Amino acid sequence: MGTTGKVLRGCLLAAGLLVLSMVAVVGLYIGWGLYANERAEKAANALCAGIRIGDPVDAVIAKAQAADPAPRVQSGSEETYFIYQGMIFSARECHVSTVRGRITAKRVILHDDD
């Protein structure tokens, strides 16, 4: 086998390894994304399930921030969002409505890039 054959074999091997690496990265990304979505959904469902109507929102916020995973909390005067990040462009949240600092309603919301 000549020099050209060795160079060609080396180039093909490098190209094959590059393609294999890209396939592995995409596979890992998809696997991680599925895991992240499931973890976020379980956390949002668990938080909402543990909330009772009439609970003080400040106590729920403190409890949520001490949990693992801790959500990102966005709080307004009459509603609070406990956001759990899943895969990129995907999140799960427990949304609660409040009146005078007490929870009056709750629901889980799924945000996906559709």
Image: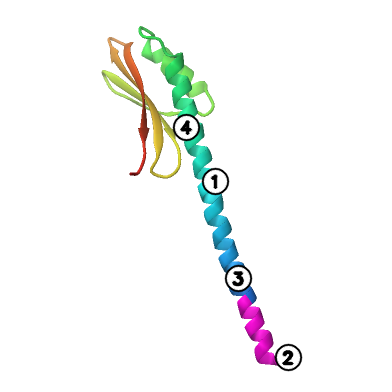
Tell me which amino acid carries mark 1. Answer: Gly
Name the residue that disc number 3 marks.
16
31 left or right of 75 in image: right
* Inter-mark Cα distance, 4 to 3: 36 Å
Asked which colour scheme the image uses, the reply is rainbow
Neighbourhood count class around disc 4 (C-alpha, 10 Å): few under 14, some 14–19, many 20 upward: many
Label 2 sits on a secondary structure element that is loop
What is the x, y in percent for residue 36? 50, 38
59 w.r.t. 95: above or below: above
Q: State the image quarter where residue 24 is shown.
A: bottom right
Mark 4 lies on a secondary structure that is helix
Please state if 6 lies on the left or on the right of 35 as rendered.
right
Residue named by callout 1: 31
Q: What residue is at 29 percent from the left and 14 percent from the top?
A: 98
Q: Is residue 88 left or right of residue 105?
A: right
Instruction: Residue at 29% x, 20% y: name it.
Output: 79
Residue 78 picture quarter: top left
- Spot the residue most to the bottom: 2
Whether residue 2 is in magenta: the answer is yes
How far apart marks 1 and 2 lie (CA) works out to 42 Å
Q: Residues within 10 Å of mark 1 (few under 14, many from 20)?
A: few
Find disc 4 in the rendering and name its residue: 40
Q: Which residues are magenta?
A: 1-12
Sequence-first tag of 4 and 1: 1
Tell us which disc is closer to us: 4 or 2: 2
Marks 2,3: beta carbons within 8 A: no
Query: Residue at coordinates 37% horizontally, 14% vertically from top-left?
Result: 57
Q: Which SS type dominates the magenta stretch?
A: helix
